[in-house]
Image (spheres, coloured by chain):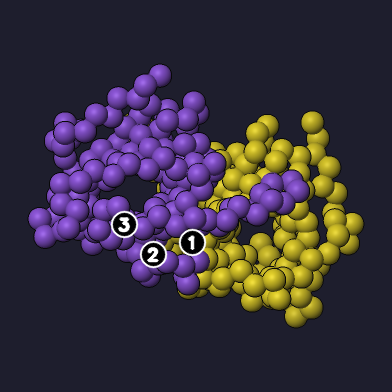
Chain colours: A purple, B yellow
Amino acid sequence: MIEGVQLTELRIIEVEGGDVLHAMKRSDPGFNGYGEAYFSTVEHGATKAWKRHRSMVMNLVVPVGKIRFVLYDDREASPTYGRFSEFLLSRENYQRLTVPPMVWIGFQGVDGTPSLLLNVADIEHDPQETDRVGLEEFDFSWKVEE
Amino acid sequence: MIEGVQLTELRIIEVEGGDVLHAMKRSDPGFNGYGEAYFSTVEHGATKAWKRHRSMVMNLVVPVGKIRFVLYDDREASPTYGRFSEFLLSRENYQRLTVPPMVWIGFQGVDGTPSLLLNVADIEHDPQETDRVGLEEFDFSWKVEE
């Protein structure tokens, strides 16, 4: 696992008429304060990469569909420097992915239908603290076997 | 509008490959502290009613599907005592519904497919602060015209 990244099992409570899905309690591992919660929808096959937050701790949950996340650590002082790490999140593998600042992230919709991603972030959105580079910047193949 | 209830327009930002949908910033109207974020899925036609929180302020957002909410005010000191209030939330009518403590709430899935509801609550889940009564307790017709 990339230094500082956490994966936390989440509960789905079966309820007649529709289940309850946990996302993030303030007493949960990975909670670092609350700034903003927002959704990203991810179309099937769409890849959004690469992005890095300079300050934000992301807490990512996938309640609908299936999303492939790839993290890349280029922090020179990190024990996991140069490493990629991959996660496939969905309701079937219902976990929360905590991503510390300065780790690159990309994600891809791999469900037949649009997927939904919730980020419970410790700060409000601020374009100033976000870096972006193109898909080809790091040596990772996003190709999905059909 | 029932006393203490707020409805707040939310932004959807169009992005290639999948839109970004705002849910709740800590600087937003209705924010009352952060305790927990959790999802409820609501099957088409399923009705969950009635529930009341004694302490929790709910902030409700519907990123998937369409949910009908009905609120009922039986707080004797309230200027809107005895009133029902109805809201239909979806991505087409993308608003956040803030519900204060002691107001009864029920909801119903009215999309063809399962809907998804996010609650950004100011306290963590605590069954002790929740009251429930049956669907028939208040004189409201949940029947949907097909």
Residue A73 position, x and y percent, is 19, 50
Chain letter, disc 3 residue: A
Q: Are marks 2 and 1 in contact (CB under 8 Å)?
A: yes
* Left or right: residue B19 compared with residue A63: left
- Which residue of the protein is positioned furthest toward the left in this rendering? A76
Depth check: A119 or A82 in front? A82
Depth check: B26 or A75 in front? A75
Residue A135 position, x and y percent, is 20, 33
In the rendered image of this protein, does residue A63 appear above or below residue B55?
A: above
First of labels 1, 3 by sequence position: 3
Residue B70 position, x and y percent, is 73, 55
Please give the label number shown on residue A121.
none
* Left or right: residue B28 compared with residue B121: left
Q: Residue at (15%, 46%) from the top-left corner?
A: A82
Chain letter, disc 2 residue: A
First of labels 2, 1 by sequence position: 1
Residue labelled with disc 1: A24
Residue labelled with disc 2: A30
